[in-house]
Image: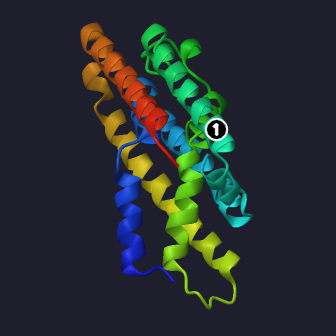
Amino acid sequence: MFGWDFLLTTMIVVVSPGAGVVYTLAAGLGQGARASAVAAFGCTLGIVPHLLAALFGLAALLHASAVAFAAVKWAGVAYLMFMAWKMLTDGGGFTVAAEHHRKSDFQVIRDGVVVNLLNPKLSIFFVAFLPQFMRSDDPHPLVTMSALGGFFMVATLVVFVIYGLFAASVRDHVIGRPRVLAWMRRSFAAAFLGIGAKLALSER
C-alpha cells in the first residue's frame, strides 16, 4: 500500500517548513521538550478534519466553491496574523518565564489544531495528493485513503516532534539572553507573517 513514491513524497511535504513547523519550534524553544511534543500533537490533530473532509467529499466542495475556499483561507490568514502579533507582544508561548505564565497543554494543543485547521490547502492537498497513490480498481477506496492519510499524520507527528526536540535542546543556550530571545520572537513573528501572506496570495 505504501510505495516508495508515496513515502518519499510524504516526507518531502512533511519536512518542508510551514506554520505547523514554526509553531512547534517556537513551543520547543519557549517551553521545552514537553511543550514541543504537545504542539506537534496539536498540529497533527489539526489534520484530522482535512482528512475527514477528503473522505466525505467536503474538500471537493471547498475546491469547487470560491466563496468557501476564500472564507477558510482568510480565517487562516487572520489567525496567522494573530499568532504573529501575540509573538511580538507577549511571546505567544515563546517566553521563558515563571511556571504560572506558561501556556497549558490544552492551550498549546488548541493553538496547534487551529494552525492546521484553518489551512484550506490541506484539504485540497488530500484530494489532489492521496488519490494519485490509489488504484482505480481499489475495492475499498475509503479504507485505503484512511490508511494513507493515517500514515501522513504519523509522519507529521514524528517529524514535528524531532523539530521540537531539537529546538528544546538549544533552549538552555538562549535562556538568560534577552536580546537573543527578542530577535527570535521577531523572527518567528516574521515567519508567521510570511506564511500568512503566502496563504493570502494562494489560489485554489
Amino acid type indicated by mark 1: Val
Say which of 14 and 198 sits in front.
198
- Residue 199's place in the image compared with 150, above or below, is above
Question: In the rendering, at what x and y percent does residue 155 appear?
Answer: 46, 60
Residue 105 is left or right of residue 192, and the answer is: right
Closer to the camera in the image, 159 or 61: 61
Q: Secondary structure at mark 1?
A: helix
Percent from the top left, x then y, of residue 204? 53, 49
**In which quadrant of the rendered view does residue 185 lie?**
top left
To which residue does mark 1 refer? 72
Kindly identify the residue that appears in the image at 49 percent across and 42 percent down. Answer: 37
- Residue shown at 62% from the left, 73% from the top: 145
For the question of whether residue 146 can be seen, the reply is yes
Dot 1, crowdedness within 10 Å: few (<14), some or many (≥20)? some
Q: Residue at x 51, y 63 (%)?
A: 152
Quadrant of the image occupied by residue 191:
top left
Q: How many marks?
A: 1
